[in-house]
Image: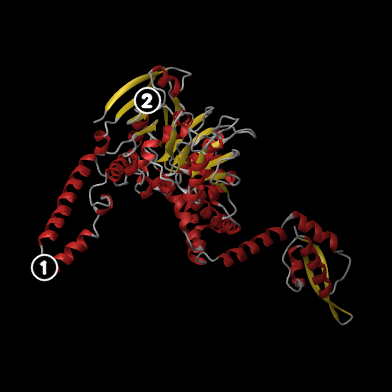
Amino acid sequence: MLKERVVKIHRGEYLSDVLSREGFVALPTNCVINKMLPGLGATYCELTSLRKSIIVEPNVPVIVDKAKKHDHTLAVHKGGMVQHVADFLEKNKKHHYKILTTPESFQKVKDAMTELQIDMYSECFMLFDECEKLVQDVDYRDTIREPMNDFFQFRSKAMVSATPILANDGRFEEHGFRILRIEPTYDYKKKLRLITTNNVCESLVELLGQLRLNNRSRVCIFVNSIDTIDSLFIDIPELENSYTFCSEESTFKLWKAGKRKKSIYIDELMPFNFFTSRFFSAVDIISNVSPHVIILSDMYGAPQSAIDPATEAIQIVGRFRKGVRSITHISSIRPSLEYRSEKELDSWLEGADRIYNGWKDALKRSKNDGERTLLREAMLGNSYLPYLDQDDKPDPFLIANLYEAEKVKVLYTNQSNLYEAYRTTRFFDVEFTPELHLFSDEDRLALHRQRTRKGRFALLLMRFEELEKLRLNPAQKAQDKYHHLLTRLIRSKDDRTLYECYEKMGSGFIRDKIDFNLRAMERFIDRQNDHIIKNSGPMKHLIHSLFDEQTLYSKSEVSAILTQAYKKQGLFVGKTIPSTELKRWYHVETIRKDEYDRVKLLKKND
């Protein structure tokens, strides 16, 4: 356990003020700085310090943004060349240069230093910013911890975050690390509304309505799933012109899904903006209008969108240096989500480690080829292997990630767990609102996942049946809800055809008589519509105006007049309309005159 020192920060102060008061000229070395609040200027302290620095930031947008604002500063990331770094070092060797790099590009910095015979360990201060990412992201981003072996070799080094998570790495104690906690003397709690729901999409729609947005409003939605973002575009037409800020890989995925506005850099906020996890921390989001911040956790569509209230939620709110108008977290709750408790993880890791090392010992002792083959097969294909480092030792960052991930999972199995997690952060003043909708996330996603028209029709028909109670309820609130949900369900001309057929003939006809056949529905609706038009008042008036009861008509004349009347009313006409159709509007008889059959109009039908 690292020793902790607590220092106070007062309202209006920045980290530089605190450090100066405590006798530090810059960020202290061998220290994890827990600044508790985002936006206190920790990175700024290092960028303006009178020493050469290497600053590791978790994502590209952060380093690009900060490098633009400071002299003698270089952003190193994917696509950059070692020679580019070397040229920068040569040019700025007499300055207090600052190199901002992603963890993955740190090797380029190291190679450039080696090429120029610079001892970076003694010449530079190394700062690892937003250090919780070392633990939180290492499971899917293995390279994020690559600089750590070098980090501990620097003579001067530190980590910083408003929400630090430390791995149980013995090197912290070995190098005399301590924690410097910056504790505010003022109330810094932010109001947050927590909405737990069975349908994140419907809750989002309702929230957007409650926010009373106008042309100047800005809404920023943070969700760690491109699939969820894309599904919201499908379900909520109002979000069609949203901007999505995400990684290069995700921009391609959105491009494949359609013409979506997306970027890897934040330039200007649109009325609606989506942000994936690379924008949860470090980067500053500048807006002249204080935005409404919405955090979305879609536990049925994307379990990876679970947000840790104690770290990620705090970091998200901290992106906006000029403040926000409101903060809301909308989350589904998934009781069936599997997780392991801390005690279960302790037991599993202990047992796995014992068995794995037993295999290693047996391999050393064995001379039998069969034994050695099976032992190697077991050692190279087991579930403990992902938690070992390159030296075959338990990796402290991967193991810390496992504990953190399971700890977050349990929050989303019960709404009380999530509420309590927010309440205990000390960062939020929580208003809790549980919501229950007629259709759930599972219902919504089932429609998205259907790949056949018949399958979609079968699901939609069940939804139409479930809406009947609302349709038959005369209360205005029920009617409004009915029309709202119906609008959400009907997304295409085919969906509209299904609903029209359902209204006219019921679900039994669609399921049992025509087996969801779209062409059969269209033909039936056309016949029904023709019947309605033919029996309408305007059609009756038109026919009566075209015929004279004092005139005898040939059958071909009757057919020609009816054909024109049908076309005028927008009815489908084949070759001609038979003269017998006139019986809809007149009592008629056929008489013989001048050796030809004539149609005589007796009287109008009632």
User: Can residue 473 be seen in this snapshot?
Assistant: no
Q: Is residue 251 above or below residue 591?
A: above
Q: Is residue 368 above or below residue 593?
A: above
Amino acid marked by disc 1: Asn
Indicate the position of residue 155 as horizontal and vertical percent values: 33, 35
Q: Which residue is mark 1?
A: 368
Q: Residues within 10 Å of mark 1 (few under 14, many from 20)?
A: few
Q: Secondary structure at mark 2?
A: loop
In the rendered image, the quadrant that contains the C terminus is bottom right
Q: Residue furthest bottom?
A: 595
User: Is label 2 or label 1 in front?
Assistant: 1
Q: Please tell me which residue lies in front, 47 or 15.
A: 47
At horizontal 49% and vertical 56% (from top left) the residue drawn is: 461
Q: Residues within 10 Å of mark 2 (few under 14, many from 20)?
A: some
Q: Please tell me which residue lies in front, 84 or 13.
A: 84
Whether residue 372 sits left or right of residue 391 in the image: it is left
What is the quadrant of residue 559 in the picture? bottom right
In the rendered image, the quadrant that contains the N terminus is top left
Residue 583 shows which numbered tag? none
Q: Is residue 411 above or below residue 253?
A: above
Indicate the position of residue 602 as horizontal and vertical percent values: 81, 65
At horizontal 38% and vertical 46% (from top left) the residue drawn is: 144
Q: Which residue is mark 2?
A: 426
Count the numbered circles shown. Answer: 2
User: Can residue 118 be seen in this snapshot?
Assistant: yes
Amino acid marked by disc 2: Arg
Name which of mark 2 and mark 1 comes first in the sequence.
Answer: 1
Indicate the position of residue 491 as horizontal and vertical percent values: 57, 53
In this figure, which colouring scheme has been used for the structure?
Answer: secondary structure
